[in-house]
Image (cartoon, coloured by chain):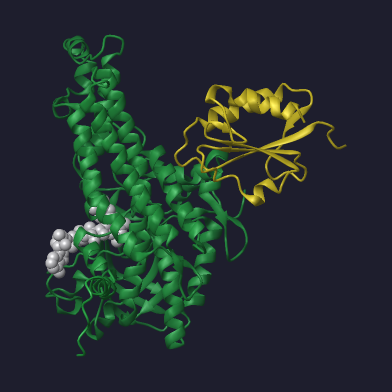
Amino acid sequence: MIMGMIRGDEYRERLQRVKPEIYYLGEKIESVATHPAFLPHVNAVALTYDMAWAPEFEELLTTKSHLTGEKINIFTHIHHSTADLVQKVKALRALGQQTGSCFARCVGHDALNAIYSVTYDMDQKNGTEYHQRFLNFLKEVQAKDLFISGAMTDPKGDRSLSPSEQADPDQYLHVVEKRRDGIVVRGAKAHITGAVNALGHLVMPTTSMKEADADFAVCFYVPVDAPGLIHIFGRQTNDERKCGCLIDQGNVEYGIVGGEALVVFDDVFVPWEHVFMCGEYDFVFELVERFATAHRQNYGGCKVGLSDALIGATYALAEVQGTAKASHIRDKLVEMVHLAETLYCCSLACSCQGYALPAGNFMADPLLANVTKLNVTRHIYEIARLAQDIAGGILATLPSEIDWQDSRVGKYVDKYLKGVASVPAETRMRLLRLIEGMTCGTALVESMHGAGSPQAQKIMIMRRANWEHKKRLAQKLAKIRERPK
Amino acid sequence: MLSSKIQVSVKYCGSCNPLIDLAKLGNALKEALSQDNDLTLVPPESARIDIMLILCGCPRACGNKEEIRARAARSIVVAGETVDLVPTPEKDISAAIMKKLKSG
Ligand SMILES: Cc1cc2nc3c(=O)[nH]c(=O)nc-3n(C[C@H](O)[C@H](O)[C@H](O)COP(=O)(O)OP(=O)(O)OC[C@H]3O[C@@H](n4cnc5c(N)ncnc54)[C@H](O)[C@@H]3O)c2cc1C
């Protein structure tokens, strides 16, 4: 056992030991680690631990803690070079290839990196002690190799109003009481990846704020079974197939997204030692931007890993269906690779162009990270469209595995679902189900809204575009003299 | 007692998008080394490593780092379908490495 690195089994055991309040389809869930609705997500997270021990992946999934010098899992690391940023992207791609789904650990990891730098900046300006507090927490996270979610998105109510202007103030999570020993918070966080199978939540504000919003400027850690914390797990496309199906699940062991939940904070107490911002509304934009940059940097890593698996499934299916040699099919497969590798280029570029922040840790280039994620909102959809084109209508009309196994009609399913004579129908069915899971419904929405909707990236690109420099270049080339103002 | 066999260790690049099957290659080498009278496989953390095999999935060769090479007197680098920069088809890589190991 290495301090700072656990294995998947230890993670599963930890899940059995905590007792978070979770609801799904009207049921109060007793065991996340074994319930079929959550198992795919638990398996994906477990793999982030196990791959770190596998010699082939160790170089990407482990690193050295800058705090202790110990070997740690990459998902608890604070980046200290552009090489670290590049390593993260490559690790995410490798993990995406092996899971074919979201593996949830990046969000909390990105939150750690963002909070690390912003607590430092707040202390420099205000003389507070958030950074040391955060370092103590970080040491614990690294030593325990803790899986924590990153909870930023508020329900937001009326989007045209700021937090303090909402008819219901709980639409944004806020402080309702400050006590000697800590704070009490109320509100909710929406769409939180891995919320039900994490060990705790790292909570951050979601949007830039004014002085009137100071109660909403709050950042803290809370264990998943803190009193008052309620998790309502989201439905996913075809989630009933997780119970009792094998082939029809497509991705048999892992999920389609990360397993998202609405997390309700019904007056939850947080001790001061776990509070990392409380009222510093003027640092919220910085925190949101740094978290968003780290998170948007990821998408040309993990989603490219998923695309590798999807392209592989599509290519194999074309072979099974006898179309792989057709020129338009080859062209479409090449286009899928081109789009995926374009995203990879984006993630690598923003990592290589990363830079040091005052706390000494490194952040990816924000402009390029936003370009990465904006491209993901388009290219992943186009990759899915091409996969569906090559797959054919059977993607939407494939009989179930239950009918394939039925003694009366199974032989017809077997006969009429065959492609080339040498390959059994079952192979074609399995490939089709995998493509269905990866391209239909819930899976795609993650590429659109995960890490922020396209407009959020456009706003950041607008801010970072260096407009005046571009204008000066044009003026110089066209020999336009600036008139004095 | 110190082993008189030549101590060989294997380090992988991390396998983000390998052009060759690194796990298969690693297993083939493990098998070949276990049957060899002069060579023995040791973990990458070992105090004494005579030759370090750095197995990388593509020409970028991310595992070929100074600190990894420094662990042994000699290293052999596989980077996609090359062995020490010499183009080598995937099916021949294991044999090419064994030949290099045996040639001292
Ligand atoms: C699969 C998945 C996983 C996720 N995981 C996490 C997670 O782990 N942690 C986390 O914190 N969040 C997570 N998210 C949340 C994600 O960051 C949000 O979905 C995203 O920021 C968009 O917010 P929203 O869903 O509330 O949509 P909205 O903000 O309602 O956006 C809907 C549309 O309205 C537009 N819009 C919104 N506000 C305005 C406005 N004021 N003026 C004009 N137009 C507006 C948007 O541009 C968009 O076009 C996840 C989301 C998904 C889908």
Towards the viewer: A151 or B21: B21
| Residue found at the far bottom of this picture | A485
Kindly identify the residue that appears in the image at 21 percent across and 44 percent down. A381
The spot of residue B5 in percent (x, y) is: 81, 31
Relative placement, left or right, of A305 versus B77 is: left
| Residue found at the far front of this picture | A479
Towards the viewer: A149 or B97: B97
Q: Quadrant of ligand 1?
A: bottom left
Residue A234 visible (yes or no) = no
Q: Which shade of the palette goes to chain A?
A: green
Chain yellow in the figure, letter: B
| Residue found at the far right of this picture | B1
The quadrant in which residue A111 appears is: bottom left
The spot of residue A137 in percent (x, y) is: 50, 68
Relative placement, left or right, of B10 versus A112 is: right
The spot of residue A175 in percent (x, y) is: 29, 77
